[in-house]
Amino acid sequence: MNSLSKALLLLCCLTSACSIYAATDNSKIAVSLSYDDALASQLDNALPALNKYNFKASFYLVPNSETITSRLSEWRKAAQQGHELGNHSLFHPCSASKPSRAWVSDEQNLDHYSTARVIREVLTANVFLQAIDGKTQRTFTPPCFDTQAAGNDFIEPLRAHFVAIKGVDDSEHTVLWAPVNVTGQQLIDYVKNVPENVRLINLLFHGIGGDHLSVSVTAHAQLLAYLAANKDQYYVDSYINIMKKQEKE
Ligand SMILES: [Zn+2]
């Protein structure tokens, strides 16, 4: 809790409004835990760890991922448990011309996409996701956080189709980090040391204890244990729930 929040809490307690203030999440920093690319290690390791604390997260699925066919019922169950199945496009296109993008195949290369094509594919991914979870509202994380196809913006036309777009709609009160191969203490230190004006911390994971860009099961568990032990300072929820709540405020 930052010093302003502490001062407000003290003031509330002194003026007998304490129970109202303490009962809301408004004084807390929101934490969005998200998991990209529909990876097996997320079903194996991230989901059970989240459910242990009843934390709701966002899983940004790519419908042509292997786990969508092999473990579809588990993704559906995750949605039923209250986790968000977010849109991460249909085929995960990224710009091959950016640094460290040698892995982007020709057919996945956003530099060769028209905006109409990327928009059509993203909206088709929504149809797939609705078939899994029955929902018509969700958020979007652009693959690689790329926002242009062959130099043309495709985010603006997509805005009307999503509650929020991660990494794009974020205000100055938001931070975002995609940790890779870090310790639990590094994750905790990051959360602890965000600037005082931050109201939303986005932690964007890929593999947990396996797959690509991974964070160990232990480090991930240590972060969740820290967040669970400090519920007076942080509230963890899916990105869609956090952004809907912020809209209302
Ligand atoms: Zn991705």
Image (cartoon, grey):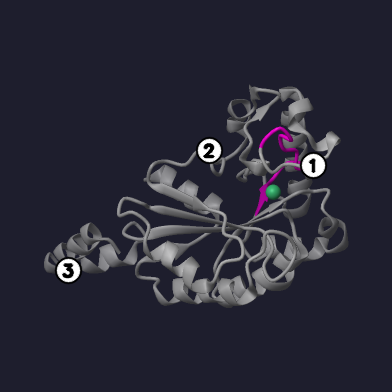
Image coords of residue 24 (percent x, y):
34, 62
Q: Residue at x 75, y 42 (%)?
A: 92
In the image, taking residue 85 as reference, residue 65 lies left or right, namely right
Q: Residues within 10 Å of mark 2 (few under 14, many from 20)?
A: some
* Label 3 to label 1: alpha-carbon separation: 52 Å
Residue under pointer 3: 13
Label of residue 168 in the image: 2
Q: Residue at x 57, y 63 (%)?
A: 56
Image coords of residue 154 (percent x, y):
64, 27
- Identity of the residue furthest to the left in this view: 14
Kind of residue at badge 1:
Phe
**Toward the viewer: 138 or 112?**
112
Q: Are marks 2 and 3 in contact (CB under 8 Å)?
A: no
Residue under pointer 1: 91
Q: Tag 3, which secondary structure? A: helix
Please identify, in this view, whether the residue under mark 3 or under mark 1 is nearer the observer. Answer: 1
Q: Tag 2, which secondary structure? A: loop
Q: Quadrant of residue 204?
A: bottom right
Instruction: Give the prevailing secondary structure in the magenta stretch.
Output: loop
Q: In the rendered view, would you say 139 is above or below 123?
A: below
Kind of residue at badge 2:
Val
Image coords of residue 224 (percent x, y):
52, 72
Kind of residue at badge 3:
Cys
State which region is magenta.
Answer: 85-98
Earlier-in-chain disc, 1 versus 2: 1
Q: Quadrant of residue 103?
A: top right
Does the beta carbon of the residue at mark 2 sit less than 8 Å from ligand 1?
A: no
Q: Tag 1, which secondary structure? A: loop
